Image (tube, rainbow, N blue to C red):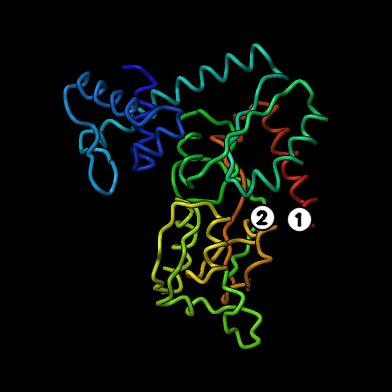
Amino acid sequence: MESKKLEALLMAADLGSFTTAAEVLGYTQSGLTHMMNSLEREVGFALLERGRRGVRLTDRGEQLAPLMREFLRTGTELNDAVEQLSAARGGTIHTAAYASLAMHWLPAIIQTFRAENPSVDVDIRMADHVDAPYALLSQGKMDVIFVSRQEQGRYDWVHLKDDAMYAVLPKDYPVGGRTAFPLHEFDGKDFLMPAQGFDKDILRIFDREGVRANVRPTVVDDAAVVSMVEHGLGVSMMTELTLKGRAERVLTLPVEPAASRELGVAVRSLEGAPEALRRFIDCTQRVVRELED
């Protein structure tokens, strides 16, 4: 079996969507579907179930998935070893990041890192789905990812910042002089969910506090959500970093009780990381501390 077919299968299963998996991997949706059909003909039975809620592994697919991941992991380790031997201090670091992190942190990080390590390139991929970087990391396509912490997969974590959550409200929202927005006040309100996939961080907070908002899923970016709130189409909740440069037309208040998402970088293994990657992570920690002080 070809590794690219296995990678595509696991990506589709991890993200629950052919469309999102195709975007992340750079395929057309029809091309990805054709690849999956070819793989299933090759093995002789169905590996994915397709439905209105997306795609997921069949029972047989679930049984084979750990072996597929191990096969891909071993191949990645071999490639990493070859790259380390051929260019011990050089090479390329492949990274994926959420848009807010890429916008506010990565330019300064990369500028500093390149000045200190001119022989190492940094390749950046933007992520528009919370699960996409984790799927890319697990398949060995990324060396390091800038993400909010999720309880999925096996990886080593380096904490960078607790990114505080803020209620995003129309300017004329009646706050009555309050300096914080009670989370329970989202109950029953039309709630505009930020960019696709990032509902995980918000719903985790809502579930913890027992909040039952009238969630209106969107397929637009965060700037468009802010504009929709501005025009009275609902309320939302975003992080401090996401709102930078976007909050002048809306009212923002820290939520109460205080809530945040944990931001950091994830790698497959710090212990086995190449020296260049270790230097990149060290540089990241230094620069983020300077930016956030």
Q: At 61% from the left edge and 35% from the top edge, which residue is drawn?
A: 270
Q: What residue is drawn where x is 43% and y is 71%?
A: 190
Mark 2 vs 1: CB contact within 8 A: yes
Vertical arrangement, residue 32 with respect to residue 145, above or below: above
Q: Nearer the viewer, residue 286 or 16?
A: 16
Q: Is residue 194 above or below residue 276?
A: below
Left or right: residue 244 versus residue 38 is right
Front in this rendered view, residue 85 or 22 = 22
Residue 5 image label: none
The answer to which image quadrant residue 113 occupies is top right
SS class of the residue under badge 2?
Answer: strand
Quadrant into which the N terminus falls: top left
Label whose residue precedes the other's in the sequence (2 or 1): 2
Front-most of 35 and 162? 35
Q: Amino acid at mark 1?
A: Glu
In this image, 195 relative to 83: left or right? left
* Residue found at the very far left of the displayed protein: 44
Q: Label 1, on which residue?
A: 292
Which residue is denoted by mark 2 in the rendering?
Answer: 161
Q: Is residue 52 above or below residue 173?
A: above
Q: CA distance from mark 2 to mark 1?
A: 8 Å
